[in-house]
Amino acid sequence: MKEIQEREAAEYIAQARRQYHFESNQRTCNMTVLSMLPTLRDALMYQLNSESLTSLLKNKPTNKLEIWEDLKIISFTRSIVAVYSTCMLVVLLRVQLNIIGGYIYLDNAAVCKNGTTLLAPPEVQQQYLSSIQHLLGDGLTELITVVKKAVQSIFGSISLKHALSLLDLDEKLKEVRRIIEETEDKLLYKETKYQCVLCHYMMPDEENPLASQANGLTEKDVTTIKLLNETRDMLESPDFNRVLNSCLNRGFSRLLDNMAEFFRPTEQEICHSDSMSSLSSVSLPLAKIIPIINGQIHSVCSETPSHFVQDLLMMEQVKDFAANVYEAFSTPQQLEK
């Protein structure tokens, strides 16, 4: 009886310790996301510089219409990429920090027991987590190109004078998303892996550059490559895809909510609207919508917890997914599988 009680007590303490470590890890995830948003916003504003166009317009140039057309494409592209990249940052960091968190938990447990070799030494952690730079660099540039092309095909032919309601805008954004994610619906399978269309913006398709130095690979490099491959496997899972998709749906919904305040009907319009939906009762010319959509980047990529980022961080699906990843990498039996 005494042995059973001691074993149960030890298991309870281990479980409580793991739960505490997991919760602390989620707080780290949230803080990391918020700390990286200014870098993401700066990269976006640098690559899609609408401010230079607006200052040109103030000088009443002869090619005013041409500049407005450019501003239209850049403004929509910038906000749409902001939603995509913020959602990707939230979900990718959840995967990375929970994989590494699981290894750290096992390392701490092992050190307490017999001081064995670490599964994830600090240098490996640093090397592994630096791979997020792909999303903020080459991945972002590639995403901008794809989104810009989709925006051009949907909004390019719409006149600046053409009036759009919030409902019309929602439909147009859905059309842009369909172009960007169109192959997503075809559920491509790459051997036995689920192929996520948006994955290569988060991690390069090819093996990690470290892998090409096959001759000079240190033990730490090999461990880092193993972690990166495990991350890629996770990114190609249907679960990851579902969570990312839920985040994108929430993100685009929040983007429209942010813009809704500019589409508020006047008291007079409310009196005459009868049962008409307020979403479609107010329309604005596209030229008036452009400055509104252009400014959305500041609420989407805001490091002071905005409703947009808070919404994503607090989603139950994101929390459950994080718990599953941590469970898989902090349990020796699961890790062996």
Image: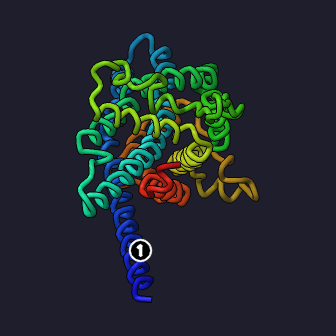
174, 9: nearer the viewer: 9
Q: Position of residue 291 (x, y in %)?
A: 45, 34
Q: Which residue is found at the position 31% from the left and 61% from the top?
A: 109
Residue 330 can be seen, yes or no: yes
Q: Is residue 108 above or below residue 177?
A: below
Percent from the top left, x then y, of residue 112? 25, 63
At horizontal 63% and vertical 28% (from top left) the residue drawn is: 190
| Residue under the point 45% across and 34% down | 229
Locate residue 210: give its quadrant. Answer: top left
Residue placed most toward the observer, 267 or 13:
13
Report the side of 67 relative to 176 (left or right).
left
Q: Which residue has dot 1 on it?
A: 11
Tally the numbered discs.
Answer: 1
Q: Position of residue 40 (x, y in %)?
A: 35, 36
**Residue 222 relative to residue 150: left or right:** left
Q: Residue at x 60, y 28 (%)?
A: 180
Task: State the SS at label 1.
Answer: helix
Would you place residue 279 above or below residue 73 in this image?
Answer: below
Question: Residue 301, how many percent across, how many down?
Answer: 39, 43
Q: Left or right: where does residue 9 sit relative to residue 199?
A: left
Q: Amino acid at mark 1?
A: Glu
